[in-house]
Image: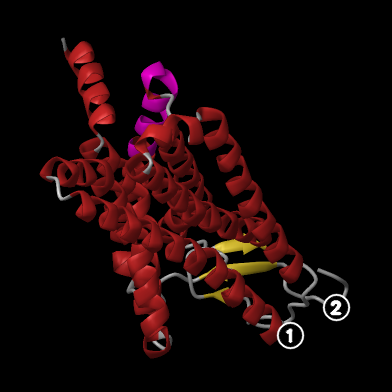
Amino acid sequence: MGNESEVFHFILIGFPGLPEKFYGAVASVIICVYSLSLCANITVIMIILLKVHLHQPMYIIILNLAVSDLTFDTATMPNIIVRYFSGDGTLSFTACCFQMGIIHSLNCVDSLTIMLMAFDRYVAICKPLRYHAIITNKVTMALCCLVWLAGSSVGLFVMSWVLPLPFCGPNRIRLFYCSMSLVAVLSCTDTSIIRRNGFYAGIIMHVGPLTFILISYIVIIASICLTSRSENWKKLYNTCIAHWFVITLFYLPRVIDYGIQAQILSNTDVFVLLNCLYTYVPHFSSPIIFCLRTQEIRRTLRKILSERLG
């Protein structure tokens, strides 16, 4: 932090307007959400890893998303639980910066992974005869490695922007985890350029993939419409509906947040609640959606359960 800094820890305040008598209830809800996320994502990860017939490109991408979501929740949700069970919301400067890097890395990984899903579905539906030549396991794993490399680079850039900043005054973060925009604003120096760069980086990492996703599905739907076959519509529905749910859960709340943030920024409780909803709900709901809507995973899970119960 440098000799001029006097702040050695930050305080995660969460919901500032929440009466203390509700702390236990909030902690209990977070424990339930975290447990559900752990169970759902670990189930998907283990099924895909252990069942050889699921070692296919689409399931490798789903596995990638589950690992990212599980890591994000593990890096942030225990802080919320401790905050409302013990009342201790402190986080050291080093831990805060490390958490910040992880969070921004994984947000990028999620966005790019969902884009890979759209690319996989585009090739599978629009170029079915060439699918196995274009989308192989090796290609998919290489793309997933590039996704993690891109996410790690974003996290390192974010940390490199914040680490040199001097902090000598306010140290209360109005959220449950360390976000660059909310930490940088607490610095003793002007951080408008850093926050603007962070905003632009976020736009690139979310709007870019979202644009690709929308174009991909427009092409997919146009291709299906041109064939005018009912079985193709059924194929489109069965292979893409789970992805559409995940895309909607991930991107729609963020678009709404960016659109109304100026109006709700002054109400910290609303800001924190909205942030929690669009951050954590997709993490436990996505693996559940894949289990319910992806035929191979659903069939495999049903077989495992019948063997265990039988």
Q: Residue shown at 53%/52% (left/top)? A: 109
Residue type of the residue flagged with mark 2: Glu
- Label 2 vs label 1: CA separation? 10 Å
Asked which quadrant contains residue 239, the reply is top left
Decide if residue 129 is in sight here.
yes
Q: Point out which mark residue 4 bears.
A: 2
Q: Split into 4 quadrants, where in the image is the N terminus?
A: bottom right
Q: Nearer the viewer, mark 2 or mark 1?
A: 1
Give the label on residue 188, or none: 1
Residue 251: percent from left, percent from top: 38, 64
Instruction: Give 14 or 306, whichever is nearer the viewer.
Output: 306
Q: In screen coordinates, is 22 left or right of 136?
A: left
Q: In the drawing, does residue 1 fall left or right of residue 253?
A: right
Labels 2 & 1 near each other (Cβ < 8 A): yes
Q: The disc labelled 1 sits on which kind of residue? A: Cys
Question: In the image, is residue 47 part of the stretch drawn in magenta?
Answer: yes
Q: Which residues are magenta?
A: 40-53
Name which residue lies at 40% across and 69% down.
275
Q: Is residue 224 magenta?
A: no
Residue 111, relative to residue 14: is it above or below? above
